[in-house]
């Protein structure tokens, strides 16, 4: 069954929405064969497969290229693409053109935007223009240089109120879902209860309507994975063993 923003909204409350990243056709096919609900072409493509230290160097062209590769798998899962660093803070007409590229050239069915309450008016304009928006709050990896690293969000009363306000504003602005990254689990649970749109968590406990994970982290393909990501298979070691067997076959001859 083809997943849509509508079917995701209908899944609110069942804690069963399964989301995972993919950056190419091969991994998108794997994710789809496993019957996930959403494939995110995350800007984590930068640090997970392109060799950058963070998501900041990822450009619009890179996102379009990787999104198109995922969409060519024609998955039943909804394909969402990240809006890369800086873009959502510029001119609205430019942002709209970039969403058009991601949807028309890339085949994305939704975009994900990192941002607090300041991003709500932009989300409202995008949704009015027919762009489905998944709003991403809590840890925003694109702010890594501003923050000086990665950390848990929602520990202080001020931060808690700001995150509540952002979640509420994004829902009012028309976002079809909220992504809650590295948030204190109790806060993620409270936001989930209050919101009428689905929440998808990562490193934010189990009370969200769904979860997202970076595929390479759970397949043993990431040298640096976050501690909350469970490794379900060690494909990295298996690949090295397989390539070594190939090497031995060649060198024996
Ligand atoms: O870019 C990404 O993969 C993400 C996930 C970590 C949620 O935003």
Image (cartoon, rainbow, N blue to C red):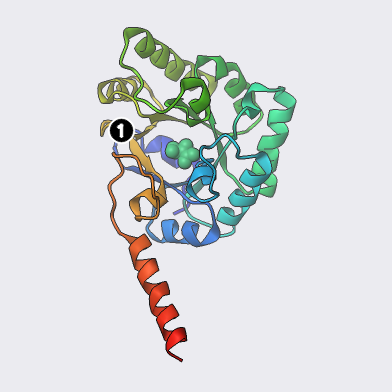
Image quadrant assignment for residue 139: top left
Q: Residue at x 74, y 26 (%)?
A: 93
Q: Position of residue 83 (x, y in %)?
A: 59, 35
Q: Position of residue 141 (x, y in %)?
A: 48, 31
Q: Position of residue 106 (x, y in %)?
A: 64, 48
Q: Residue at x 54, y 40 (%)?
A: 43
Q: Nearer the viewer, residue 152 or 67?
A: 152
Please tell me whether residue 39 is drawn above or below residue 54 in the rendered image: below
Query: Which residue is most to the top?
Result: 158
Q: Residue at x 29, y 39 (%)?
A: 227
Instruction: State how many labels appear.
Output: 1
Q: Quadrant of the N terminus?
A: bottom left
Please tell me whether residue 64 is drawn above or below residue 14 in the rendered image: below
Q: Nearer the viewer, residue 148 or 70?
A: 148
Left or right side of 30 for 206? left
Q: Position of residue 169 (x, y in %)?
A: 48, 16
Image quadrant assignment for residue 249: bottom left
Which residue corresponds to mark 1? 13
Left or right side of 86 for 48? left
Q: Nearer the viewer, residue 245 or 87?
A: 245
Q: Residues within 10 Å of mark 1 (few under 14, many from 20)?
A: some
Please tell me whether residue 193 is drawn above or below residue 216 in the rendered image: above
Residue 212 seen in render: yes
For disc 1, does the CB lie below 8 Å from ligand 1? no
Task: Name the element at disc 1.
Answer: loop
Q: Residue at x 30, y 59 (%)?
A: 233
Residue 6 seen in render: no
Image quadrant assignment for residue 185: top left
Left or right side of 129 for 170? left
């Amino acid at each position: 069954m083809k997943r849509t923003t509508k079917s995701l909204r209908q899944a609110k409350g069942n804690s069963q929405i399964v989301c995972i990243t993919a950056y190419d056709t091969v991994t998108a096919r794997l994710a789809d064969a496993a019957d996930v609900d959403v494939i995110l072409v995350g800007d984590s493509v930068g640090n997970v497969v392109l060799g950058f230290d963070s998501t900041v160097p990822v450009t619009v062209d890179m996102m379009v290229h990787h999104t198109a590769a995922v969409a060519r798998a024609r998955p039943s899962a909804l394909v969402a693409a990240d809006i890369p660093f800086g873009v959502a803070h510029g001119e609205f007409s430019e942002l709209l053109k970039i969403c058009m590229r991601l949807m028309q050239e890339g085949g994305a069915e939704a975009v994900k935007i990192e941002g607090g309450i300041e991003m709500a008016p932009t989300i409202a304009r995008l949704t009015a223009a027919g762009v489905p928006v998944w709003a991403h709050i809590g840890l925003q990896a694109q702010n890594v240089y501003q923050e000086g690293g990665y950390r848990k969000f929602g520990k202080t009363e001020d931060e808690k109120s700001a995150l509540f306000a952002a979640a509420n504003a994004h829902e009012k602005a028309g976002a079809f879902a909220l992504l809650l990254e590295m948030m204190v689990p109790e806060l993620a649970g409270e936001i989930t209860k209050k919101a009428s749109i689905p929440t998808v968590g990562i490193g934010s406990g189990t009370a969200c309507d769904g979860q997202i994970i970076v595929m390479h982290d759970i397949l043993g393909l990431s040298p640096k994975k976050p501690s909350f990501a469970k490794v379900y298979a060690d494909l990295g070691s298996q690949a090295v063993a397989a390539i070594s067997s190939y090497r031995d076959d060649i060198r024996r001859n």
